[in-house]
Amino acid sequence: MPSPRKSDGGGTNVRVVTRVRPLSSAEKKRGCSPAIGTLDTGGKNGPDFLEIGPEKRRFELDAVLPSQSTQAEVYERSGASRAVKQDLIKGFNTTILAYGQTGSGKTFTMGTATSQGNEDNEGVIPRAVNDVFNIAKKPSITTKVEVSYMEIYNEEIRDLLSDDETDANGRSGELRVQEFPDGTMGVANLTSRVVKNSAEVGYWMEEASKKRAVASTAMNAVSSRSHAVCTLSITITPSTLISNRDDDSSESGDESTTASENKSIASDNKSTISNGTASSREKISAKLTLVDLAGSEKIKRTGATGSRMQEGININKGLFVLGQVIAALSEKSSKNIKKYIPYRESKLTRLLQDSLGGNARTIMIACVSPADDNIEESTNTLRYAERARSIQNDAKRNVIAMAMSPAEAAALRKENQKLRFELKQALAEKNNEAKKFACSLSSLRSLSVSDTTDQNPICNGEINGISVKNQKEDIVLRLHEKCLVQESKLKKLEGELQNSRDQVSSVSKEAERWRLKLQNACSFIEVRTQTNVY
């Protein structure tokens, strides 16, 4: 499974793959021949190469998916599978978008059109949805999934899941692209549906597909006339203590992969470790954005007139700005210079600001036609795709620290009380030893005043348990030894006392840190509620 390419700046590069569709029946009737050839691949993790046209122009991409590739192979080799199973569940925002000319197979690849019950024809979106809900079945987590679906038609945003036809037609004026308080881009007042399984997502996608703008042109019988964006907002909350110990038994194949995914969730979400278990205090909130772009088209070739022609003009406008954004980001990343990025020139690029150069891990699937009469369009698509490979994103995990449970708070208070009691005991023992040591010193001083051993009343007795002989030197040596022992004990007690104080201070700081995290989390939730993010 391919991993994201790391950039020199510490982020990850946009992963770009190309899918070459088979020749269509219309192209075969026109006598077209394939003009794209795949060269030797770079192995399992790429890069791959392809050549196009009589000049054999070569392009380097992360993966090249030839015309015989199945939908399952596209999902795996494009990196979409890894993005959902590993990146998304760790809290990384993930974007998968399809780009290319009209009729190049974008909608089929993404799966925004119905597959008519044929699982083999399911595209990226239904496969990603299935993976999301397979993750949601894990007993160690509680998952909430919300879906939203919109299109950008003639530079207007249309809510495809709204019950209000006014909103669906984009005339309400309330649907606008904006930056939310958490720094992410989104559409205000967009309908969001809570879904519990993949079947519910499929239902809402079917409903949305009925509203999406499509039309027939000379190049595509079912041409998408808008850019479609499907977003799955996922919140993962730990429901139980996650074991930090490795499983005693491990199996190969799919089961071992599932085990590693479970451990991945545990290792990325744990915050405190006690007695071999990790108690998670992190709630993950991430977005999976799936984009089916309308295809670029030439008015002369599509034969569009009237409203169809105006649709094509607006489609090309959005894609032109997207090309400018890709070019500017590519130059900024490759030359490491400051560069103005024209995100605001269109609603499409404004909406994709996080996905291109922002807080997301992004996969671009460039769809091309192999026909020789589409060489110019395919070459332009591949040129933009190759540039996009150098774009650097700065994806960060989206986690919210959870407050301590009542049981954890009670355990912390109990530990604090125990440390205070131990500290009090240590102070009492120190005082007793100090008094005993002072008494020994006083006895030694009184002994040194005596001129003869016969006049000393303690010569044949004991001083604090020390047997005193008749010789004065022997008495001094024994008392000196006792003093050294007492001094050693005193230093040890002082060290234990300092450790106890440090422990109490550490516990107090930890309690204060969690109190601040709870306060910040409550403030953040209040802000999100007021701004109606979803």
Image (cartoon, rainbow, N blue to C red):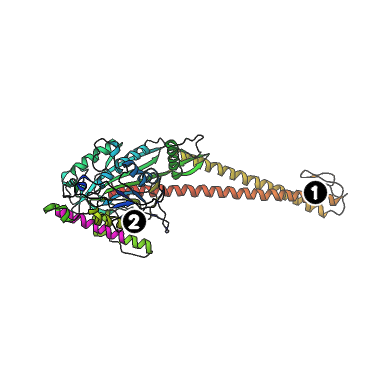
Q: Residues within 10 Å of mark 1 (few under 14, many from 20)?
A: some
Residue type at mark 1 is Arg
* Image position of 226 with respect to 333: above or below: above
Is 498 placed left or right of 193 in the picture? Answer: right
Which structural element holds mark 2? strand
**Residue 402 in view (yes/no):** no
Of mark 2 and mark 1, the one earlier in the sequence is 2
| Residue 432, position as x, y percentages in the image | 67, 46
Residue 97: x %, y % from top left: 30, 49
Main secondary structure found in the magenta portion? helix
* Amino acid carrying mark 2 in the image: Phe
Q: Which residue is mark 1?
A: 478
Residue matched to label 2: 59
Above or below, 431 against 388 in this view is above
Q: Nearer the viewer, residue 405 or 122?
A: 122
Q: Is residue 154 visible?
A: yes
Residue furthest to the left in view is 306
